[in-house]
Image (tube, grey):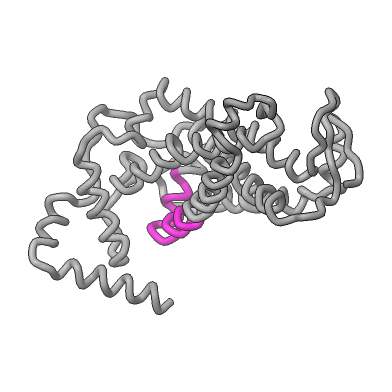
């Protein structure tokens, strides 16, 4: 709390410096996109957004179990044979496949619909506006925004990084560490060693966890009912519909976290291979 107070006071002090207010007036935090796009969030955006959150929470949890558990409760082997892996790693890679499929659907529809301009910067103005929005967030004086029509510049940069930088990094490094990677490809393994993939994959997971926490915090503190209605109810109205849909989705996610235990996973994993005790 003390550190947060220092950051806020420092940011507010910065706004008193000569020229800063003029900068904030010139760059309020957003800019008009180069191409017009329909306002709002179509059903495909809302569903892929929820599925991304649902799967990412389970991926982070299962990934942490893979990293921290030295004695996994069970092992899994493919019906085609091959390497025996922990049931937690089977869950992690299975969730990854679903997450990548969901992401591919999102990206394809993003460009087909023209909604790509919502999260892809189209002007160099994005950078000074993002700096302005960041300073306004740090002062706790939220930048003027209307996510129903256009994200502010800082949001746009962060969403771009999540979709087009962090997600591919997670996928590329995850494949390198998976059982699908050709272990006998000596030259390829020398060019792209597993140690490099691990050094990138874990920080990427921490980035996703941090992003989710900050994202949810800002959604709740910058007009929760309206923001939740945008992404869960598909409306710009201010009522409780989106909140209850969000609460239902959150309860489903929490339930899935508790359900992903060996007694539940074993029968499902057994459909695709052989489950054995350690």
* Residue 251 screen position, x and y as percent: 66, 53
Residue 219 counted in the magenta span: yes
Horizontal side of 14 relative to 83 (left or right) equals left
Residue 143 placed where, x, y %?
A: 27, 56
**Where residue 263 sits in the image (x, y, percent)?**
87, 48
Residue 40 in the figure: left or right of residue 278:
left
- The quarter of the picture where the N terminus appears is bottom left
| Residue extending furthest toward the top | 112
Image-based side of 76 in relation to 1, left or right: right
Could you tell me how many numbered marks the image carries?
0
Q: Which residues are magenta?
A: 213-230
Return the residue found at the far bottom.
2
In the depicted structure, whether residue 229 falls above or below residue 106: below
Residue at image location 76% in from the left, 48% down from the top: 260
Q: Within the magenta stretch, is there residue 229? A: yes
Viewer-proximal residue among 15 and 173: 173
Lateral position of residue 198 relative to residue 77, left or right: left
- The residue under the point 46% across, 59% down is 217
* 59 over 107 or under it: above or below: below
Q: Would you place residue 221 above or below residue 77 in this image? A: below
């Amino acid at each position: 709390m003390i550190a947060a107070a220092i950051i806020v006071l420092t940011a507010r002090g910065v706004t008193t410096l000569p020229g800063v207010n003029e900068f904030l007036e010139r760059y309020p935090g957003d800019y008009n996109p180069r191409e017009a796009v329909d306002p709002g969030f179509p059903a495909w955006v809302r569903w892929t957004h929820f599925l991304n959150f649902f799967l990412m929470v389970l991926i982070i949890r299962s990934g942490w179990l893979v990293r921290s558990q030295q004695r996994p409760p069970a092992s899994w082997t493919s019906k085609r044979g091959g390497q025996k892996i922990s049931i937690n790693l089977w869950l992690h890679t299975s969730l990854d496949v679903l997450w990548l499929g969901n992401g591919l659907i999102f990206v394809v529809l993003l460009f087909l619909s023209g909604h790509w301009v919502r999260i892809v910067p189209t002007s160099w103005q994005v950078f000074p506006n993002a700096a302005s929005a960041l300073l306004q967030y740090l002062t706790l004086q939220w930048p003027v925004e209307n996510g129903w029509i256009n994200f502010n510049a800082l949001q746009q940069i962060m969403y771009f990084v999540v979709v087009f930088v962090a997600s591919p990094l997670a996928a590329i490094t995850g494949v390198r560490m998976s059982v699908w990677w050709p272990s006998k490809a000596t030259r390829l393994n020398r060019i792209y060693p597993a140690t490099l993939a691990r050094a990138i994959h874990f920080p990427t997971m921490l980035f996703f966890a941090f992003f989710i926490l900050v994202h949810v915090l800002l959604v709740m503190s910058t007009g929760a009912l309206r923001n939740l209605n945008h992404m869960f109810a598909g409306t710009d109205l201010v009522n409780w519909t989106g909140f209850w849909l969000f609460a239902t989705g959150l309860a489903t996610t929490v339930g899935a976290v508790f359900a992903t235990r060996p007694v539940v996973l074993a029968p499902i994993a057994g459909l695709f291979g052989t489950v054995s005790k350690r």
